[in-house]
Image: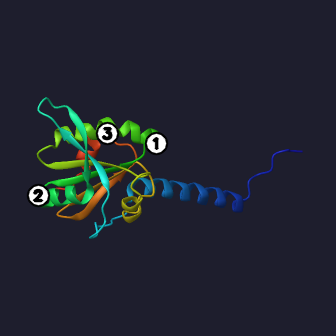
């Protein structure tokens, strides 16, 4: 007499379906990105990662709408990192975003937005997971990445003008 019962095909099919669903959600959650364009009147405070003469990066308070207007007028891409101080992956991303700012200073304006303090921006752009890096070109949403990525990975994902 065996203590182990063979798995029925119904049980096996349920397990396969659960694994497939998990894989689909995992992949979709990392690659799908909500595309939301900025709207008139949507504003908040962000920090601009400004690159100094000696390549040091400082965080300068700026209004989101002013940075968006500047990026649009200059033809630069606006790169916005939505994150929070308590988030481990967000803290890991901070030096990577500083590298992005340094490497793309002629092509992009890089901002960070604290989702805990900027609820209107967070809600408008439907940020559901952090870190969430968004790209904006010509005043319109142009993709982004969710989760921790290296500076090289973020730069590789930037849309071309």
Work out which residue is located at the far top of the displayed protein and give it. Answer: 54
- Give the labeled residue for mark 3: 150
Helix, strand or loop at label 2? It is loop
Query: Which circle marks residue 87 in the picture?
Result: 1
Which is nearer the eye, 114 or 76?
114
Residue 25 is left or right of residue 41, and the answer is right
Q: Quadrant of residue 161?
A: bottom left
Residue 115 is left or right of residue 65, and the answer is right
Which is nearer the eye, 124 or 65?
65
Work out which residue is located at the far bottom of the displayed protein and give it. Answer: 40
| Disc 3 + disc 2, Cβ < 8 Å | no
- Residue 133, image x, y percentages: 33, 51
- Give the labeled residue for mark 2: 75
Q: Which residue shows up at 80% across the image and 50% down it?
A: 5
Helix, strand or loop at label 1? It is loop
- Colour logic: rainbow
From mark 1 to mark 3, how far is it between C-alphas? 16 Å
Work out which residue is located at the far right of the displayed protein and give it. Answer: 1
- Which sits earlier in the primary sequence, circle 2 or circle 1? 2
Quadrant showing the N terminus: top right
Residue 54 is left or right of residue 8, and the answer is left
> Few, some or many C-alpha atoms within 10 Å of disc 2 (few <14, some 14-19, many ≥20)?
some
- Residue 153, image x, y percentages: 28, 43
Q: Which residue shows up at 19% across the image and 41% down it?
A: 50
Q: Which residue shows up at 22% across the image and 54% down it?
A: 78
Q: Quadrant of residue 94?
A: top left
């Amino acid at each position: 007499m065996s203590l182990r019962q063979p798995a029925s095909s119904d049980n096996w099919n349920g397990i396969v379906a659960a694994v497939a669903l998990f894989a689909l959600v995992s992949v979709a959650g990392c690659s799908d990105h909500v595309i939301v364009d900025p709207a008139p009147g949507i504003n908040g405070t962000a920090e601009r990662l400004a690159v100094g003469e000696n390549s040091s990066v400082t965080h300068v308070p700026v209004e989101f709408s002013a940075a968006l207007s500047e990026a649009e007028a200059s033809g630069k891409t606006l790169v916005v990192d939505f994150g929070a101080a308590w988030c481990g992956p967000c803290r890991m991303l901070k030096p990577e975003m500083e590298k992005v700012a340094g490497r793309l200073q002629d092509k992009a304006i890089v901002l960070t937005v604290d989702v805990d303090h900027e609820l209107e921006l967070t809600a408008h752009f439907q940020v559901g997971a952090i870190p969430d890096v968004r790209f904006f070109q010509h005043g319109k949403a142009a993709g982004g990445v969710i989760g921790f990525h290296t500076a090289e990975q973020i730069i590789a994902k930037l849309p071309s003008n």
